[in-house]
Amino acid sequence: MVGRRPPARRRHGATVRGRRPRVNTQTYLGFDYGTKSIGVAVGRLASARAEGAGCVAGLKSGPDWDAISRLVQLWQPQGLVVGLPRNMDGTDNAMTALSLRFGRRLDGRYHLPVYWVDERLTTVAVREHVRDTGARKTRRKAMLDTLAAVAILQAFFDEPQQRTRWQEQGKAG
């Protein structure tokens, strides 16, 4: 062992050659589509944690695409996740077709993978949580939309088997 160098010291998070290991930091945006407002959440696959990014107003002509474009530009997501509302028995309801259309339009505008997440119990659970905060009614609505988007995106991270790609689901609506 004479004349042999000691092993290189490693800094926290660095390899011997000074390169950091590649971490999957894919960012995703989650949406809780509504005709009056759209809740938005953001999260990274590496942390598997979603957080609220606010609400986008629904306009008479449809979603505020300028606001959504700003969010896509800001976060540079690798995918978009849309909550798919269904009745408790799994059948479609009035919002199902609108959410499918919104997802197809996201795909057409941004050319990013669009995923669907079943949101059947999301709104009920979030509504109970928001009601317990004691916030005013107008504030509760914004909180509800944002937290529903957080729950949708968190379900995408936590339950990969619940994900459905647009090509599989979106063409049906």
Image (spheres, rainbow, N blue to C red):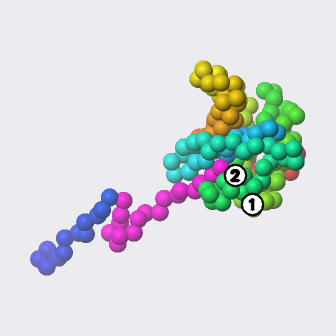
The residue singled out by tag 1 in the image is: 110
Res 134 → quadrant = top right
Residue situated furthest left in the rendering: 2
Question: In the rendered view of the protein, which quadrant contains the N terminus?
Answer: bottom left
Please give the name of the residue rendered at 72% of the width and 45% of the height, measured from the top-left corner. Answer: 56
Name the residue located 48 percent from the left edge and 59 percent from the top edge: 23
What's the magenta region?
A: 13-29
Q: Position of residue 86 (x, y in %)?
A: 80, 33
Q: Mark 2 highlights which residue? A: 80
Main secondary structure along the magenta-highlighted residues: loop
Residue 23 falls left or right of residue 18: right
Say the numbered circle drawn on residue 100. Answer: none
Position of residue 106 measured from the top left corner of the image (x, y, whole percent): 77, 54
In-front residue for pair 58/5: 58
Q: Residue at x 11, y 77 (%)?
A: 2
The total number of labels drawn is: 2
> Residue 150 is drawn in which quadrant?
top right
Query: Visible in this render: residue 14?
Result: yes
Instruction: Relative to 120, say whether 84 is above or below.
Output: below
Q: Quadrant of residue 138?
A: top right
Q: Could you tell me the amino acid type at mark 2? A: Leu
Residue type, numbered disc 1? Tyr
From the viewer's side, name the closer residue of 112 and 9: 112
